Image (cartoon, grey):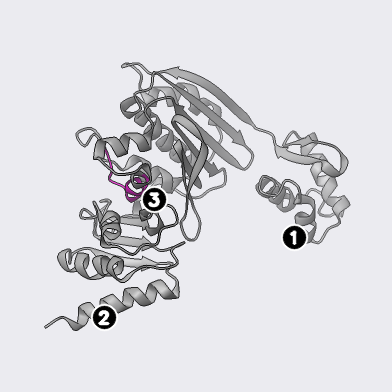
């Protein structure tokens, strides 16, 4: 044990995993590194002494949390003179000194984009900013008490339901003020951070980075007046702003936003199946500006023939310059897609 007692690898593993496993971290570390639980406890005590961990509870019920390196929580009055970049420079950036430049750039982009939305769209008199810098990640929160983002999109675009607003938001290029905004801020911010969440009204919408994109849409019992945006990124992240823009740029387009990923499950309401042409049209709305559209079928167990036909025959025929690509489809969904596509091919002269 003496040889690896101060192992950086063990220490870093504890810090990176303790939030997700607060009650079982000792067992997980022991199994991962082949050391005794007593040895793991020595690491835990050392991290507490170093000020990296905060113990909670006693003996068997003891849990550990990461102690913030820096944190702040303040209210900002929304005035015509308020500028989001000035707020970033004077109130947030000074607390994040020493972080990796690429992480700092992403935090700058995300904070200023989200706070600009508060200024221009929220109709709120005040906003709340919270940030927390802990050893393994940085979390930024921007909250207002205004009209609510999903409510505003639904109202301005004449949509049927706020869940439909979430679908439109996920596609990108959505704005209720085309003269002053491109509609790309939320889309690209959500792709830069490890996790990006929006709470508004009774809806909770989140996007999580990974080998494949993970999406979550939930109905909350408690109504949240206004909008809360939560963004977090690992302090060791190598992701850059350029990475996010490159991922959604079709080859040869020189940074034009021409590629999008759309979670198909967001086109349904509740537990309904995706079977109708009207549902497909809802999914396909506003996709004309893109050259490549990735339809993510994660969480979709079944699609009807009219739904598939509207996308993979009717839409493709009327929009031959848009490349529709489906991913993460189960066998049943894939069979239906291939069925309507083969029908389309059979009908060619």
Along the line of sight, the residue nearer the viewer: 311 or 208: 311
Task: Name the disc covering residue 181, or none.
Answer: none
Residue 40 drawn in magenta? no
At numbered mark 3, what does the secondary structure look like: helix, strand or loop? helix
Tell which circle, 1 or 3, labels the residue nearer the N-terminal end: 1
Pointer 2 local density, CA inside 10 Å: few below 14, some 14–19, many at least 20:
few
Viewer-nearest of discs 2 and 3 = 2
Q: Is residue 211 above or below residue 100?
A: below
The residue indicated by pointer 1 is: 32
Q: Cα distance, mark 2 to mark 3?
A: 35 Å
Task: Name the disc covering residue 244, or none.
Answer: 3
Asked whether residue 7 is in view, the answer is no
Q: Which residue is at a point 86% across and 56% down the rendered structure image?
A: 36
Mark 1 in CB contact with mark 2 (< 8 angstroms): no
At numbered mark 2, what does the secondary structure look like: helix, strand or loop? helix
Along the line of sight, the residue nearer the viewer: 219 or 115: 219
Q: Quadrant of the C terminus?
A: bottom left
Q: Which residue is at a point 35% across and 31% down the rendered structure image?
A: 117
x, y percentage for residue 69? Answer: 64, 32
x, y percentage for residue 75? Answer: 49, 19
Mainly helix, strand or loop, the magenta region? helix
x, y percentage for residue 329? Answer: 42, 69
Mark 2 in CB contact with mark 3 (< 8 angstroms): no
Q: Cα distance, mark 1 to mark 2?
A: 50 Å
At numbered mark 1, what does the secondary structure look like: helix, strand or loop? helix
The residue indicated by pointer 2 is: 342
Mark 1 in CB contact with mark 3 (< 8 angstroms): no
Tell which circle, 2 or 3, labels the residue nearer the N-terminal end: 3
Q: Is residue 197 above or below residue 277?
A: above
Report the magenta residues as a range.
166-175
Q: Which residue is at a point 16% across and 81% down the rendered structure image?
A: 347
């Amino acid at each position: 044990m003496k040889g690896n007692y101060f192992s950086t690898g063990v220490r870093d593993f504890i810090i990176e995993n303790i939030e997700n496993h607060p009650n079982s971290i000792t067992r997980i570390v022991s199994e991962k590194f082949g050391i005794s639980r007593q040895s793991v406890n020595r690491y835990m005590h050392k991290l507490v002494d170093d000020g990296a961990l905060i113990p909670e509870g006693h003996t068997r019920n003891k849990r550990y949390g990461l102690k913030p390196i820096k944190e702040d929580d303040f209210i900002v009055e929304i005035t015509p003179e308020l500028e989001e970049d000035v707020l970033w420079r004077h109130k947030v950036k000074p607390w994040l000194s020493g972080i990796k430049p690429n992480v700092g750039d992403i935090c700058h982009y995300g904070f200023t984009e989200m706070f600009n939305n508060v200024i221009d769209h929220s109709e709120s008199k005040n906003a709340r900013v919270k940030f927390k810098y802990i050893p393994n990640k940085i979390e930024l929160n921007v909250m207002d008490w205004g009209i609510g983002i999903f409510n505003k999109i639904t109202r301005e675009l004449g949509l049927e339901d706020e869940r439909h607003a979430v679908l439109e938001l996920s596609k990108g290029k959505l704005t209720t003020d085309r003269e002053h905004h491109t509609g790309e801020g939320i889309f690209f911010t959500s792709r830069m951070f490890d996790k990006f969440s929006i709470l508004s009204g009774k809806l909770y919408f989140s996007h999580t980075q990974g080998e494949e994109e993970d999406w979550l849409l939930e109905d909350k019992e408690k109504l949240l007046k206004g909008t809360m945006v939560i963004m977090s990124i690992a302090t060791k992240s190598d992701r850059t702003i350029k990475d996010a823009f490159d991922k959604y740029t079709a080859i040869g387009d020189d940074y034009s936003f021409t590629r999008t990923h759309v979670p198909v499950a967001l086109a349904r309401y509740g537990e309904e199946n995706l079977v109708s042409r009207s549902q497909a049209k809802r999914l396909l709305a506003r996709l004309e500006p893109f050259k490549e559209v990735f339809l993510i079928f994660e969480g979709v167990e079944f699609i009807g023939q009219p739904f598939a036909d509207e996308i993979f025959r009717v839409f493709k025929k009327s929009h031959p310059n848009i490349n529709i690509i489906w991913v993460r489809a189960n066998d049943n969904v894939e069979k239906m897609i291939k069925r309507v596509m083969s029908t389309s091919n059979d009908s060619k002269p």
